[in-house]
């Protein structure tokens, strides 16, 4: 007898999760099969919807709702991991680029918060298109963005990335 969560797909094609005692039915093509005699399908659907709601809440807690970028919380977690990795592996390198939009407050003051929000979304898209694959671009707050670059080839590569970011933001919106 096992206790835990088993996921699967019903005959109707919907995904389900069982959180109950499970009796092993053996293996089929290296895949374990279980019997859960006490789980009617509506319980499985309820658990699946709870799991989906949980996943949405976790995502929303670590992403900025406006730009859909990782937020400060997720960025700091990734930065903590990078610093811990550096302690364990002295050859490991990473870099952090901080981006603060100058003269952003007058945009909100003159054109309203909706215009400011639209500008932030545009900026986020341009930055996203300019960073390296695997870099963590986050909205740090207000008009601030940060980039965590792991495994940079050197200062030259980081200078080139900074130049790309500046160029992307220098084009009119």
Image (tube, rainbow, N blue to C red):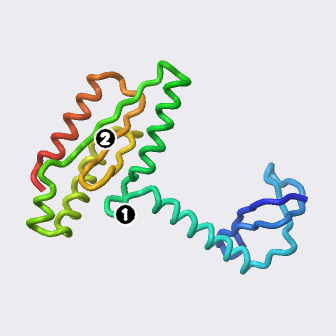
- Viewer-nearest residue: 25 or 143: 143
Q: Who's the residue at 30% across and 48% down the image?
A: 128
Q: Is residue 68 above or below residue 72?
A: below
Percent x, y for residue 8?
71, 64
Name the quadrant of the N terminus.
bottom right
Disc 2 residue crowd, few under 14, some 14–19, many 20+, Cα 10 Å: some
- Report the side of 103 relative to 72 (left or right): left
In the depicted structure, whether residue 11 falls above or below residue 161: below
Q: Position of residue 59 (x, y in %)?
A: 49, 60
The residue located at (22%, 53%) in the rendering is 123
In the displayed structure image, the side of residue 49 where residue 106 appears, left or right: left
According to the picture, the residue beneath numbered tag 2 turns out to be 131
Q: Residue 50's spot in the image, x, y percent?
A: 62, 71
In which quarter of the view is residue 97 placed?
top left
User: From mark 1 to mark 2, how far is it between C-alphas?
Assistant: 20 Å
x and y, in percent, of residue 80 in the image: 48, 38
SS of the residue at dot 1? loop
Identify the secondary structure beneath mark 2.
Answer: loop
Q: Residue at x 37, y 38 (%)?
A: 148
Instruction: Give the number of callouts.
Output: 2
Rendered position, 34 above or below 168: below
Q: Which mark is residue 18?
A: none
Quarter-wise, where is residue 163 in the image?
top left
Left or right: residue 152 versus residue 90 is left
Task: Kindly identify which residue carries mark 1.
Answer: 65
Q: Nearer the viewer, mark 1 or mark 2?
A: 1
Residue at the extreme top: 91
Mark 1 or mark 2, earlier in chain = 1
For residue 11, side relative to residue 20 (left or right): left
Q: In terms of image quadrants, where is residue 115?
A: bottom left
| Front in this rendered view, residue 91 or 144 | 144
């Amino acid at each position: 007898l096992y206790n835990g969560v088993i996921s699967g797909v019903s005959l109707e094609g919907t995904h389900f999760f069982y959180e109950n005692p499970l009796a092993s039915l053996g293996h089929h093509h290296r895949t374990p099969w279980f019997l859960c005699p006490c789980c009617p399908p509506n319980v499985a659907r309820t658990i699946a919807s709870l799991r989906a709601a949980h996943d949405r809440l976790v995502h929303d807690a670590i992403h900025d709702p406006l730009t859909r970028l990782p937020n400060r919380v997720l960025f700091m977690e990734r930065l903590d991991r990078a610093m811990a990795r550096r302690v364990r592996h002295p050859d490991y390198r990473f870099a952090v680029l901080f981006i603060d939009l100058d003269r952003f407050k007058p945009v909100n003051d003159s054109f309203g918060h909706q215009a400011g929000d639209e500008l932030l979304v545009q900026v986020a898209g341009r930055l996203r298109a300019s960073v390296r694959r695997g870099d963590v671009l986050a909205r740090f707050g207000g008009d601030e963005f940060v980039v965590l670059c792991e495994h940079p080839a050197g200062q030259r590569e980081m200078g080139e990335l900074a130049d790309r970011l500046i160029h992307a933001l220098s084009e009119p919106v």
